[in-house]
Image (tube, rainbow, N blue to C red):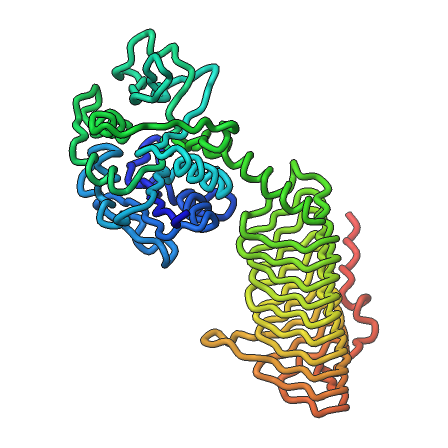
């Protein structure tokens, strides 16, 4: 089969979302709504993907580079929106039409629809479904022989009669068309309906009038065609999308201890034999290697983890952890933090824009910012790199095999050589040579009998 052109209609106002953000840009498991049908189209092997935007072009700059943007000049219904993309139709072949607010459609379904359309030889194949409570969906009309004749709208104040509203088969808004027939029929779709708009389903009777056959392909899984009109719908769709993500990961060998309390975005990748404990949130482009353990209540955003990494109840944002690194509990790794093989960021440690060498330990109660630290170094509790002078950030360089005493402060820019030591409580403001001990603190002075001198005088009698 020739690769189809897939058109995604996304020019609607989405006023029921009650949001300044366009409806199809609302996030669903880490992707804007409209990116879901775009990805399904790409995975189905679309030859061209076209998204129809409104005249204000709110989607411009928010779509992948391989997507063609078409513009509907005025809000005049779905047939008008599709005609706005006619310049991108192929001369021959199939055109599949989706909606930007129907995110759960899959590539497998699109391939199935295309196969059914090709096999039928019809000018149009409409995806339909059977519902016990069809609600406001458009009803599918058939002739006595069972052939599809068209769709009648059933929204409040719509055009359906009582008998037509009793029909259980409904239009999903997903179509496959022969490109040549579609191009010829679209200009003849009128707006003689209760809404005064050019509806896409009204192209079907035009095609029949041209002597061309119409087919229907019944969707077995109604979840595939669930649309989003408001935030309640978005939450319902999100639950299904999240369950799909969990199912895929678990079948690929990942243990998710409590899927009900775990949030994982669509573009997160996790390798086998990793365990994700309850109440974790994995978002963005996070990539997690094999044999890792992500402890309860951890949040990872755009984090890159090698194999065998352990994270205990911590927050990781845009950081890079190599094989065997350990983090937490209660650590905060900020953008630019790199933990080399076997490095440790311990309890209540914050690391930002710093490279921590292999086997190096920052065990607890420390802030490391804008620093480069060598291998097998151990920094004592309460270590601080003072990286900001009020105007600019400066880097601290600490070599390999360094032993830092507790409560050491490194005032950047400063460099510490390999194998050096710092005494507890030091404020290091000058470079420390390799192998040296830096003692940078005031000499202690004890004032004898100080407590008695400060004791209050006894109260006078009477």
Quadrant in which residue 67 is drawn: bottom left
In this rendering, would 369 be left or right of 272? left
Question: Is 404 situated above or below 38?
Answer: below
Given residues 44 and 262, the one toward you in this image is 44
Q: Position of residue 178 (x, y in %)?
A: 30, 39
In this rendering, would 227 be left or right of 212? right
Write the residue at 64% across / 89% down. 431
Write the residue at 61% across / 84% down. 414
Quadrant in which residue 386 is drawn: bottom right
Write the residue at 59% across / 60% down. 303
Question: Is 302 situated above or below 422?
Answer: above
In this rendering, would 325 be left or right of 74? right
Is residue 125 in view? yes
Given residues 186 and 448, the one toward you in this image is 186
Quadrant in which residue 198 is drawn: top left
Is residue 23 in view? no
Given residues 371 and 452, the one toward you in this image is 371
In this rendering, would 294 be left or right of 104? right
Question: Is 340 situated above or below 222?
Answer: below
Q: Position of residue 270 (x, y in %)?
A: 65, 54
Total label count?
0
């Amino acid at each position: 089969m020739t690769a189809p052109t897939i058109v995604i209609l996304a020019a609607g106002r989405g006023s029921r979302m009650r949001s300044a953000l366009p409806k199809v840009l609302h996030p669903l498991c880490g992707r804007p709504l409209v990116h879901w049908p775009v990805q399904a189209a790409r995975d189905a092997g679309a030859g061209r993907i076209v998204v129809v935007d409104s005249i204000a072009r709110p989607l411009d700059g928010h779509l992948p580079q391989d997507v063609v943007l078409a513009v509907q000049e005025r809000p005049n219904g779905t047939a008008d929106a599709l005609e706005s993309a006619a310049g991108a139709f192929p001369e021959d072949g199939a055109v599949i039409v989706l909606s930007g607010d129907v995110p759960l459609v899959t590539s497998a379904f699109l391939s199935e629809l295309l196969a059914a359309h090709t096999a039928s030889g019809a000018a149009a194949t409409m995806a339909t479904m059977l519902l016990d409570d069809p609600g406001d969906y458009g009803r599918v009309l058939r002739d006595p022989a069972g052939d599809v004749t068209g769709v009648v709208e059933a929204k409040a104040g719509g055009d359906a009669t009582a008998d037509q509203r009793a029909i259980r088969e409904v239009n999903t808004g997903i179509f496959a068309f022969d490109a040549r027939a579609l191009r010829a029929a679209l200009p003849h779709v009128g707006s003689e309906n209760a809404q005064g708009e050019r509806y896409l389903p009204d192209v079907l009777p035009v095609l029949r009038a041209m002597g061309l056959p119409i087919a229907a392909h019944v969707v077995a899984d109604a979840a595939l065609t669930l649309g989003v009109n408001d935030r309640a719908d978005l939450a319902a769709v999100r639950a299904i999308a999240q369950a799909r993500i969990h199912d895929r990961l678990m079948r690929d060998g990942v243990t998710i201890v409590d899927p009900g309390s775990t949030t994982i975005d669509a573009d997160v990748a996790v390798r086998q034999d990793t365990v994700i404990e309850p109440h974790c949130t994995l978002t963005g482009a996070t990539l997690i290697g094999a044999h890792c353990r992500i402890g309860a209540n951890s949040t990872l955003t755009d984090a890159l983890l090698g194999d065998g990494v352990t994270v205990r109840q911590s927050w990781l944002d845009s950081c890079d952890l190599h094989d065997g690194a350990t983090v937490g509990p209660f650590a905060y790794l900020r953008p630019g933090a790199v933990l080399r093989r076997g490095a440790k960021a311990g309890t209540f440690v914050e690391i930002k824009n710093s490279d921590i060498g292999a086997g190096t330990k920052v065990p607890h109660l420390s802030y490391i910012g804008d620093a480069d630290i060598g291998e097998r170094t151990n920094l004592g509790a309460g270590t601080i790199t003072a990286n900001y002078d009020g105007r600019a950030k400066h880097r601290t360089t600490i070599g390999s095999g360094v032993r830092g005493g507790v409560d050491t402060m490194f005032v950047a820019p400063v460099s510490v050589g390999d194998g050096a030591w710092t005494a507890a409580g030091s404020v290091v403001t000058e470079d420390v040579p390799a192998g040296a001990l830096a003692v940078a603190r005031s000499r202690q002075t004890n004032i004898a009998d100080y407590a008695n001198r400060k004791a209050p005088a006894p109260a006078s009698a009477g």
